[in-house]
């Protein structure tokens, strides 16, 4: 009886969380459409293209690969991480070859200048996060009354969209997307487990975990810490607008989420190796 009451309470809290995040997504969508239609902000159209592209990918995967909502969502997320990682690397390499490593990380370059294709890449990625938020809400691919994944997407949508509206700190946000290199291996791990591959001794799983940890440390955790250090160092160079407070708030939130993600990864790795050890011990006695 007590368990049933607890489950009902949990479902009710998740429903309220879903309603809140759906409302924020609708308001975000209305805002973007208003800017495009009434303010003639045609440069924001790639946001809509990103949403449509990933929704179309969702339908294709659902029709040809799997009808499981979690599998479909993960496949589309893997597609986004791959496209975004390649885009960010190409943007950075292009800027490195044209202006040099020192100039490209100057405050003026990161805040006032927009690197070639950076604006379009950020718009496209923004469209993905809106699509993914919608897909998770539609199929309830979240849990808890404050789902971290929905908070993460809302945080990104707010920071990305305000930057796109004001055309500032675009290059800073492109740097934050380096973390999508790590997201590739998060999604690969999830799909690997869905496919029933759990043997922690296999070379594929070992290599996957090595790449998972390397990209987590260097592409996600270290890069985001360096960005927040750069923001603090250049704080006097920012004007009196909302750019610095918003950037600091967003990066502090991202770093907290990275810490929790690292803890979850450590637990998952330990759980997989422990389960394999228990299976080996059981087979030995048999």
Image: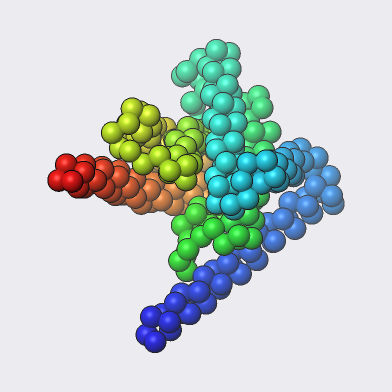
Q: Is residue 117 visible to the viewer in this orientation of the structure?
A: yes
Figure quadrant of residue 165: top right
Residue shown at the point (58%, 17%) measured from the top left: 94
Camera-nearest residue between 172 and 176? 176
Q: Residue 216 or 176: which is nearer the viewer?
A: 216
**Image quarter for residue 29?**
bottom right
Tell me: residue 154, above or below residue 217.
Answer: below
Chosen colour scheme: rainbow
* Residue extending furthest toward the top: 97
Q: Residue at x 61, y 69 (%)?
A: 19
Residue extending farthest to the front is 286
User: Where residue 103 sits in the image (x, y, percent)?
Assistant: 50, 20
Q: Nearer the viewer, residue 209 or 183?
A: 209
Query: What residue occupies the far left of the structure in this picture?
Result: 285
Report the side of 16 relative to 261 (left or right): right
Vertical comparison of 172 with 14: above or below: above
Query: Where in the figure is residue 218, as x and y percent of width and height?
Result: 37, 31
Looking at the image, which residue is at 39% across and 87% down? 1
Q: Quadrant of residue 52?
A: top right
Looking at the picture, how far across and down is residue 78, in whole percent?
55, 38
Residue beneath the point at 84% across and 45% down? 40
Q: Nearer the viewer, residue 267 or 160?
A: 267
Position of 137 relative to 204 (above/below): below
Please, is residue 29 above or below residue 238 in the view?
A: below
């Amino acid at each position: 009886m007590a368990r049933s009451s607890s489950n009902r309470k949990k479902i009710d809290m998740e429903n309220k969380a879903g309603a809140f995040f759906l409302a924020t997504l609708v308001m975000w969508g209305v805002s973007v459409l208003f800017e495009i239609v009434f303010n003639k902000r045609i440069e924001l159209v790639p946001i809509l293209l990103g949403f449509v592209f990933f929704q179309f990918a969702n339908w294709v995967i659902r029709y040809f690969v799997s009808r499981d909502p979690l599998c479909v969502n993960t496949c589309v997320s893997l597609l986004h991480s791959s496209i975004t990682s390649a885009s960010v690397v190409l943007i950075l390499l292009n800027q490195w070859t044209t202006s040099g490593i020192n100039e490209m990380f100057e405050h003026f370059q990161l805040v006032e200048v927009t690197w070639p294709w950076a604006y379009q890449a950020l718009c496209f990625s923004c469209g993905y996060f809106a699509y993914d938020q919608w897909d998770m809400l539609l199929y309830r691919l979240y849990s808890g009354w404050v789902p971290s994944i929905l908070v993460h997407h809302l945080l990104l949508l707010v920071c990305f969209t305000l930057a796109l509206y004001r055309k500032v700190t675009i290059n800073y946000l492109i740097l934050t997307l380096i973390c999508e290199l790590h997201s590739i291996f998060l999604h690969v791990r999830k799909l690997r487990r869905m496919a029933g591959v759990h043997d922690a001794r296999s070379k594929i799983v070992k290599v996957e975990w090595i790449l998972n940890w390397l990209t987590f440390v260097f592409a996600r955790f270290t890069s985001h810490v360096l960005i927040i250090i750069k923001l603090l160092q250049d704080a006097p160079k920012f004007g009196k607008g909302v750019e610095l407070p918003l950037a600091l708030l967003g990066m502090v939130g991202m770093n907290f989420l990275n810490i929790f993600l690292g803890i979850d990864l450590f637990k998952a790795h330990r759980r997989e190796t422990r389960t394999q050890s228990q299976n080996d011990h059981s087979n030995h006695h048999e």
